[in-house]
Amino acid sequence: MAARSPKIVILAEHRRNASEPPSGPLEGVSLHLDSLYRTARLLTRNEDAAEDLVQETAIRAWRGWTSLRSFTSLKPWLLQILHRTFLNTVRAEERRPPFLDIQIDELLSHPVLSIENDETAPGAPFSDDIFVALESLPSTFREALWLVDVEELKLSEVAEVMGVPVGTVASRVHRARRLLRELLRSRGQGKRGT
Amino acid sequence: MDPRCHEYRRAVLLGDVDASSNTHYLACVACRSFEQTERATSAMVRRAAPRWQAPAHLRENLAATLDRERERASRVESLRHLALVAGFTLLLVSGALAIWIGRAETAGQRRAHATTDEIVADFLKYARLGPEGPQILTTDPAAVERFFAERIRLAAKVPRLSGVTLIGGRQSNLGSRPAALLFFEQSGPEGAEPLSLFVFEPQGEDWSHMPEVKGLSGRRTCHEHKHGVGVLVWEERGLTYALAGALELDQLKGLLPL
């Protein structure tokens, strides 16, 4: 096995002391590298493209390091760069959400969207089924849900990452969860039917 | 939807649920179910999310990429610094050049200075010679004009100067060219003050750098003061007129017709 470079050892040290502010962009990116890579995988659905996206994100973070306001907001800041870098790589028509974005109050008072036919959670689906259902969600729903439920970002942080109001993020997350449940229910019914 | 349900669900989705919401939570089965479903789905997503980890080679590549980026930025910074220094130097050089060009005398200006020097030197040497100096002694301007027209073929016109008397004139030389030299006197409490008027054909003199006498209309008149002698210069009908006298600018200016 190849010996690890001193730089990587330093990165590993930083990973052990995550409470310490990183001394530079390399350490900063390294601290949240797994989160960046996971989110990049989710967005690109491709390992190589995810690595490229992370590399590009790291370069942009390096260039804009002085614009980072606080180290406590490092993770959302990096994810925001990743999000924007990803959007730059996809074509304009792919960026447009295939649904109407609505605010949370509109959603809760919507005659159709506020009603869920079966409010019960789906039984106990397999992880693979959940992931397949997650992958089939519209990209902006999928990203919002991922950042809140998996990366555990606050709604306000996700709003900053995605560049939309907090209410829109909350609405996207709720609709993503509902869609996910519906997809899992339909898959479950399909499986039972076969 | 009941407004209380709306408010409660809004708080759930925005993560703003507090103790005051508890009453509604306990009372409303639908909202309890709503919140539990949200929590359950969230937990399910978290559990099922793939545990992808950044591959080791990505970490290594990242370090190398940022090293390259640092080197590139350093090169760009050096180039920027170099460009800044070069730009600043260029600015300094061009500024110095502009100042040098601005200050450098042209040949015409040098010639004008030389002519003024000769006029001043001539005035200091000959103006106070008295009646021996002039070749023609007369107060008649027409006689003086004729004298010069015949003698040196110069159509010099005697200007009407105020407060001075024409005495006469003589042929003079400024460098290698002939010049008409007219003598005037200004009477004062301390005796007569001599004045010399040189009239000559210009030989490329450029008087533009000399300060202009303000308050005179018609032609451009400029002045210079050297060794206690004031000189007023103007051009008229192709000839240059230079009035010299041991007077201040204002006194000399007062002699000229306004």
Image (spheres, helix red, strand yellow):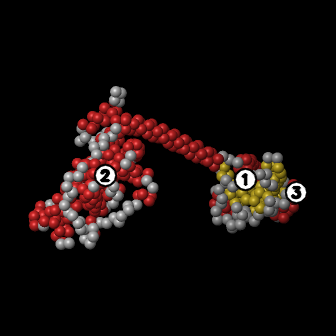
The Cα–Cα distance between marks 1 and 2, rounded to whole angstroms, is 93 Å
**Depth order, front residue of B257/A140:** A140
Which callout, 1 or 2, points to the residue nearer the camera? 2
Write down the chain letter for disc 3. B
Q: Is residue B173 visible?
A: yes
The residue shown at (45%, 58%) is A92
Contact between labelled residues 3 and 1, with CB atoms less than 8 Å apart:
no
**Image side of residue A35 versus residue B257, left or right:** left
Which amino acid is tagged 1? Asp
Q: Secondary structure at mark 1?
A: loop
Q: Which residue is mark 3?
A: B153
Residue B104 placement (x, y as % from top left) = 66, 46
The Cα–Cα distance between marks 2 and 3, rounded to whole angstroms, is 115 Å
The residue shown at (34%, 49%) is A42
Residue A88 placement (x, y as % from top left) = 43, 53
**Image side of residue B4 versus residue A79, left or right:** left
Q: Secondary structure at mark 3?
A: loop
**Depth order, front residue of A189/A163:** A189
Which amino acid is tagged 3? Arg
Is the residue at mark 1 from the same chain as the one at mark 2?
no
Which amino acid is tagged 2? Val
Which callout, 2 or 3, points to the residue nearer the camera? 2
Residue A89 placement (x, y as % from top left) = 44, 51
The label on residue B206 is 1
Contact between labelled residues 2 and 1, with CB atoms less than 8 Å apart:
no
Q: Earlier in the sequence, mark 1 or mark 3?
A: 3
Residue A90 placement (x, y as % from top left) = 43, 53
Give the position of the C terminus of chain B as an image quadrant.
bottom right
Write down the chain letter for disc 1. B
